[in-house]
Amino acid sequence: MFKLLLGTSLSLLSFCIQLVSPVAAAVFDRQGKQLSEVNLDHSQVNWQLLNSQNSRTYNGVGLIKIRDFSSCTGFFIQPKISDSAPAYVLTNGHCIDLLDNLLSPTEIVVDRTLRSYGRSPAILTFTPGYFANSGPRSTYTVRKVLYATMKNNDMALLELNISQKDLMASGVNPLQLADKPATVGTKIDVVGIPAEAVAFTHQYLHRVSCSMGATVRVKEGGYDWKQALRHRCSLLGGMSGSPMISTAGNKVVGIVNTGGGSGGRRSPLCTLDNPCEITKDDKPKPTVSFNYGQLLDRLPGCFNQGVFDLQRSSCRLEKL
């Protein structure tokens, strides 16, 4: 998982943490060659730094900030236009508080305020349209963690302190969720905010293009994800929670959550920040040249007139 102990602070402490906390990830150049994360040259990576002029499509993707020290990526979704529905943002389950304990491998969080979950208010925020050249940005507080888990998936659905209608009226464009998985070979764009191993001037929204790979089983620490989505889009710490968008239908077909890279060369395998694939004969193998996402196809049926309803008959998310 891309656990990043660094936000946008320029403090010496944050800088030191960045240096001593490498994150497993696979990064590729424009010829498809894998790059080292150490002393990474941003200009060599196969990605595009997005700007607000030509990337309005992605202004619903933004920065998830945790306690002002950690960051992930999240994205605004539109289940259905509704005057009363709150605005919803998706990110990873491991992103709801990177500086606290991770969710357990069997835990499912449902309808919790940050206060009730043992956290002080207003420590989790979302800033959409996190482009390098944008002017003043609006930041919204997460009112509730409606659903979060790392059991068989790694996702969190967050409710903001603004309505879906008002957020859209402010010019923020939501992303649409696909209701079925993408096939192997589907062209995808990953849109996220790298915040490790790149200069502060580049810690803004990027678009990375690649193809969807096979669905595989990945283990990391005590977590076991049997439907992980393999791909070779470049990823770095901070891009956890990035949407995986089918370029053909422009719908979200998955969510980034972990990666291989140099971590796959360490021993033992399958530990935190050192994930492994599990082969058909139940043996672990390194994930050096791949990154991974998680399916979101069980979520679209969980909305009733644009409002999240875990108990709805069409909702296929795992229940408590």
Image (spheres, grey):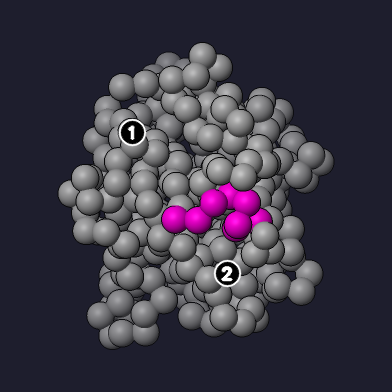
Q: Which residue is drawn at the image coordinates 70% and 73% (left, top)?
A: 51
Quarter of the image that includes the C terminus: top left
Residue situated furthest right in the rendering:
248
Q: Which mark is residue 46?
A: none
Give the residue at x 43% y 16%. Answer: 281
Q: Is residue 120 above or below residue 50?
A: above
Q: Residue at x 66, y 47 (%)?
A: 175
- Please indicate whether residue 49 sits to the left or right of residue 26 in the image: right
Q: Position of residue 154 (x, y in %)?
A: 42, 38
Specify start and end residues of the magenta stretch as a single range.
161-168
Which secondary structure is most common in the magenta stretch? Answer: helix
User: Does residue 191 appear in the picture of this structure?
Assistant: no
Measured in 3D between alpha carbons, the distance from the residue under mark 2 to the one under mark 1, in whole angstroms, is: 28 Å
Q: In terms of image quadrants, where is residue 249? A: top right
Residue 110 appears at what percent x and percent y? 33, 33
Mark 2 closeness class: few <14, some 14–19, many ≥20 residues within 10 Å: many
Image spot of residue 189 (x, y percent) = 69, 50
Q: Is residue 280 visible?
A: yes
| Number of callouts | 2
Q: Nearer the viewer, mark 2 or mark 1?
A: 1
- The part of the image, by quadrant, that contains residue 8 is bottom left
Q: Which mark is residue 130?
A: 2
* Residue at numbered disc 1: 110
- Within 10 Å of disc 1 (Cα), the crowding (few <14, some 14-19, many 20+) is some
Residue 125 percent location from the top left of the image: 41, 61
Q: Earlier in the sequence, mark 2 or mark 1?
A: 1
